Image (cartoon, helix red, strand yellow):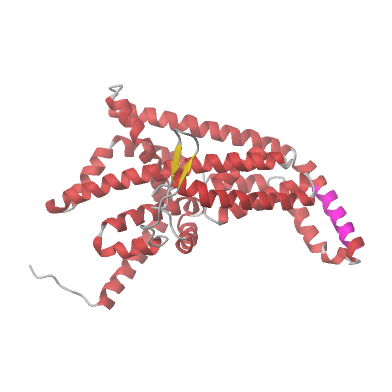
């Protein structure tokens, strides 16, 4: 059979048309594709638990899927209850925070005017009005926070339904993907699917651990600095940290506003230094040893992915873009023709780099993950 070889321009044109078509379909079906992809990630995380219920407890597949759903609902319900109580207390204290912020801000203006002999009234008039409007809207911060983590009841309802279906029909989906390709490629395709499942599960587990560690570390630092709502801000920082670079900046701004309103302006500087330390620990210790660098996306395409994800799927796309790029990178690494694209998404060739090891005790040693 003769293989038709097209010129580079023709291949490039078809690739661009295909990319535009896929992007348009993703944007058009965002109400379905976004919850489906979230359900896929959660299903990959719960596959070992569902397999345990089927093999060890002899549960039917439908029962194991419902059991996994129940566990996930309990975990998410506990997280939602914590956020609900914290945000409820926070919303009650917003008027008090507004008064404290105005007092501290006027004191800062007087100090600048007295120390530097500068008329701060005109210079800070516009900024004062902006901050007054920001804190006078009692539901603004609450609405922004809820908007980040929720795009509607329908989104989560569809995600839960897809979660059950993916777990229940995971063998059917696996067989379909394998049988789509020719017989000579089935072994290789099955190996690729297994690797993607394992890598995705490892990546999601690492991200969950990263969220917990960053939340705990941030909460401890804010508590030591005397910032109110340290637990809420810590968990908010851990969750927003899933969005590279942008998430930590958003959480830093929110924490600085709360610190400025409840403590002193100097505390804001300490909060900034604390967040810089958390970001450094996260990037140099938590990410390499917990998440690993094999599925890590470089800064350029992480930022591009965040922008594209927001354009396609809104706020949920900003959270889901990095796992999506990680899965795409894994697929690219398995296909010879598009392997260079995986190198483009990655952080360079680090195969010869020696893995770091940290010895905690005689029996416990942490090793940098691939």
Q: Nearer the viewer, residue 201 or 60?
A: 201
What is the x, y in percent for residue 163?
Answer: 38, 38
**Residue 354 showing in the rendered view:** yes
**Residue 242 showing in the rendered view:** no
Span shown in magenta: 101-113
Residue 109 colored magenta? Answer: yes
Image quadrant assignment for residue 263: top right
Could you tell me what secondary structure mostly forms the magenta stretch? Answer: helix
* Relative vertical location of residue 24 with respect to residue 33 in this rendering, above or below: below
Q: Nearer the viewer, residue 26 or 81?
A: 81
Image quadrant assignment for residue 349: bottom left
Farthest top residue? 57
Residue 189 colored magenta? Answer: no
Q: Residue at x 48, y 29 (%)?
A: 74
* Relative vertical location of residue 71 with respect to residue 324 in this rendering, above or below: above
Q: Nearer the viewer, residue 294 or 243?
A: 294
Describe residue 5's horizontal placement relative to residue 71 as left or right. Answer: left
In the rendered image, the quadrant that contains the N terminus is bottom left
Q: Residue at x 32, y 65 (%)?
A: 340
* Relative vertical location of residue 274 with respect to residue 307 in this rendering, above or below: above
Describe residue 251's horizontal placement relative to residue 261 as left or right. Answer: left
Describe residue 81's horizontal placement relative to residue 272 as left or right. Answer: left
Farthest left residue? 1
Q: Residue at x 23, y 78 (%)?
A: 7
What is the x, y in percent for residue 361?
Answer: 49, 34
What is the x, y in percent for residue 147?
Answer: 57, 47
What is the x, y in percent for residue 99?
Answer: 82, 46
Q: Residue at x 65, y 39 (%)?
A: 220
């Amino acid at each position: 059979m003769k293989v038709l070889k097209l010129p580079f321009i023709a291949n490039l044109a078809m690739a661009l048309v295909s990319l535009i078509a896929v992007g348009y379909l993703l944007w058009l079906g965002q109400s379905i594709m976004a919850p489906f992809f979230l359900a896929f990630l959660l299903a990959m995380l719960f596959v070992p638990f569902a397999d345990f219920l089927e093999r060890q407890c002899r549960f039917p597949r439908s029962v194991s899927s419902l059991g996994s759903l129940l566990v996930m609902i309990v975990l998410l319900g506990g997280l939602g209850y914590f956020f609900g109580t914290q945000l409820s207390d926070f919303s009650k204290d917003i008027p008090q925070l507004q008064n404290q912020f105005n007092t501290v801000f006027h004191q800062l203006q007087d100090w600048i005017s007295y120390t530097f002999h500068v008329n701060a009234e005109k210079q800070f008039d516009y900024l004062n009005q902006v901050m007054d409007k920001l804190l006078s809207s009692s539901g603004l911060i609450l609405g922004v926070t809820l908007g980040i983590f929720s795009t509607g009841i329908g989104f989560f309802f569809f995600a839960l339904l897809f979660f059950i279906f993916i777990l229940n029909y995971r063998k059917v989906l696996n067989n379909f993907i394998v049988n789509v390709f020719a017989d000579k490629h089935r072994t290789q395709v099955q190996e690729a699917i297994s690797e993607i499942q394992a890598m995705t599960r490892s990546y999601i587990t690492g991200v969950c651990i990263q969220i917990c560690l960053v939340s705990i570390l941030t909460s401890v630092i804010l508590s030591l600095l005397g910032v109110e709502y340290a637990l809420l801000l810590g968990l908010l920082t851990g969750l927003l940290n899933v969005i590279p670079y942008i998430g930590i900046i958003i959480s830093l701004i929110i924490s600085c506003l709360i610190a400025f309103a409840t403590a002193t302006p100097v505390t804001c500087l300490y909060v900034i230094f604390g967040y810089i330390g958390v970001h450094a620990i996260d990037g140099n210790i938590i990410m390499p040893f917990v998440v690993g660098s094999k599925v890590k996306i470089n800064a350029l395409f992480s930022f591009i992915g965040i922008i594209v994800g927001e354009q396609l799927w809104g706020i949920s796309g900003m959270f889901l873009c990095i796992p999506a790029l990680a899965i795409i990178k894994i697929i690219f690494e398995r296909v010879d023709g598009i392997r260079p694209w995986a190198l483009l998404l990655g952080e360079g060739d680090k195969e010869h780099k020696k893995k770091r090891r940290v010895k905690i005790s005689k029996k416990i040693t942490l090793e940098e993950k691939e």
